[in-house]
Amino acid sequence: MVPDLDVSIRPGSDIAQAMVPDLYVIQKVRKETDDTFTLELQEKSGRHTLSYAPGQFNMVYVFGVGEIPISISGDPASPVLVHTTRAVGTVTRVMARLRRGDMVGLRGPFGTGWPVREARGHDVVIVAGGIGLAPLRPTLYEVLSHRDEFGKVVLLYGTRTPSDILFREELEQWRARFDLEVHVTVDRADSGWRGNVGVVTALIHKSPFDPEKTIAMVCGPEIMMRFTALEMQKRGVNSDSIYLSLERNMKCGIGLCGHCQFGLFFVCKDGPVFRYSRIKDLMVKREI
Amino acid sequence: METLERILAEHPFFKDLSEPYLQLVTGCASNVRFEPEKFIFREGEEANQFYLIRQGRVALQIFAPDRGQITVETLEEGDILGWSWLIPPYNWHFDARVLELTRAIALDGKCLRRKCEEDHNLGYELLKRFAHIIEQRLSSTRLQVLDMYGA
């Protein structure tokens, strides 16, 4: 006889607690590009700040519309919680219309972060595509705030067109630094653009890093990440030293509901940041 | 002083090319310099050179009446510009516009074509090297065509 399974969730338990959103008030809304925007949030009572690791995400709930996972894009050392996202679905389109003083529900932080601690003493190569720069920005803040503890730091960033470039002012500030190598490229441009045109993967073989002591962190569309990982390996970076952030249909955020199952993993709990060597075989399986 | 032969020998494109072939290629090479906004070549013109960019940035562009000049790729220090000299009917398919002051080594394609016809081993060595560049550009172009960052 199969025993009855107790799947009830007791009020007050850790799981139940993780499913209850806290109230956050929007302090600022900033339009980044035509279809991306940044929200700065503060917990309603103003008494709590959320600590998180770069690369983690929160489930953000637009009341009456729905809840979605959004990576944290701000500085982990700052008390302000920052999320940057693109208005592409039902929830994000409504979210894009929210204004200062509006309230959202928030659960988190969830998932694994970028290996910033492990990267100490190594060269750090950050490769971002499109909105993928947002989840990597906290890593850059953290690396730059402990700059002496890392070797060369390289940011390679690709977008579709010049008007899609995120965090433009910050990129200019980073580019002006002598201890950070920044290369931006776009897939296509008119003649007014004086920068690079070409895919972000083409920047890898020209970048000044030592492949044997490099940790690479990659975030962007999955095709871009796959080709980036291949280029990194061609340069001599070990697949154990390449980290990718995956995106799947995440719902509960705690590995309970199974929506984001990816082979043996739940992206919300075991990811979103994975070592490439752990998932490279799964990434080319269509059935997963 | 850096001689042309030494510069060519140190460039990854000519890596491991035998000494006699390197001398032969050097015989077809010259230093060139292009000011910003100048065109190194224009679409439809005869393609009789290729370039090893030593400094600067060049945009490969194509003109569309409804969209103006569109940049499809930029090339910079270390990159090879042009392979139409190798493939009949030897005409450029794009404009090459200088974005920043560019210094390069120009290689005379007509001269090299003749030498490759005379010595097929040299022809094979050069083709292998260009095939690698063409493969890289084709892969990049496929990713661009995929429009990865689209919705």
Image (cartoon, coloured by chain):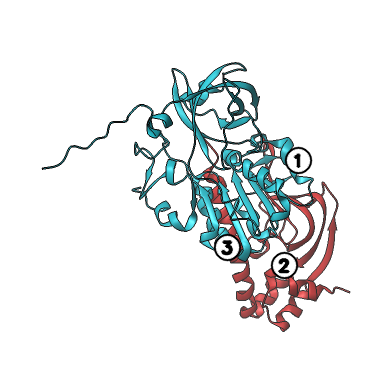
Q: Which residue is mark 1?
A: A172
Quarter occupied by residue B107:
bottom right
Front-lying residue, A176 or A116: A116
Q: Can you say whether B45 is above or below A4 in the image? A: below
Amino acid type, label 1: Glu
Residue A161: image quadrant is top right
Tell me the quarter of the picture where residue B32 sits.
bottom right
Numbered circle sitting on residue A237? 3
| Disc 1 packing (10 Å; few <14; some 14–19; many ≥20) | few
Q: Position of residue B106 (x, y in %)?
A: 78, 64
Query: Mark 2 is on which residue type?
Result: Gly
Disc 3: which chain?
A
Mark 2 chain: B
What separation in Å lies between label 2 and label 1 (alpha carbons)? 40 Å
Give me the chain letter of mark 1.
A
Q: Earlier in the sequence, mark 1 or mark 3?
A: 1
Q: Residue type at mark 3: give it.
A: Val
Q: Give chain B's shade.
A: red
Q: Residue at (49%, 55%) from the top-left corner? A: A276
Of all residues, the one furthest to the front in this rendering is: A12
Picture residue at 54% right of the left edge, 49% below the top: B143
- Could you tell me how far apart the alpha carbons at marks 1 and 3 are, in whole angstroms? 28 Å
Please identify, in this view, whether the residue under mark 2 or under mark 1 is nearer the observer.
1
Q: Residue B55, position in %: x, y?
A: 80, 58
Which SS class for mark 1? helix
Colour cyan maps to chain: A
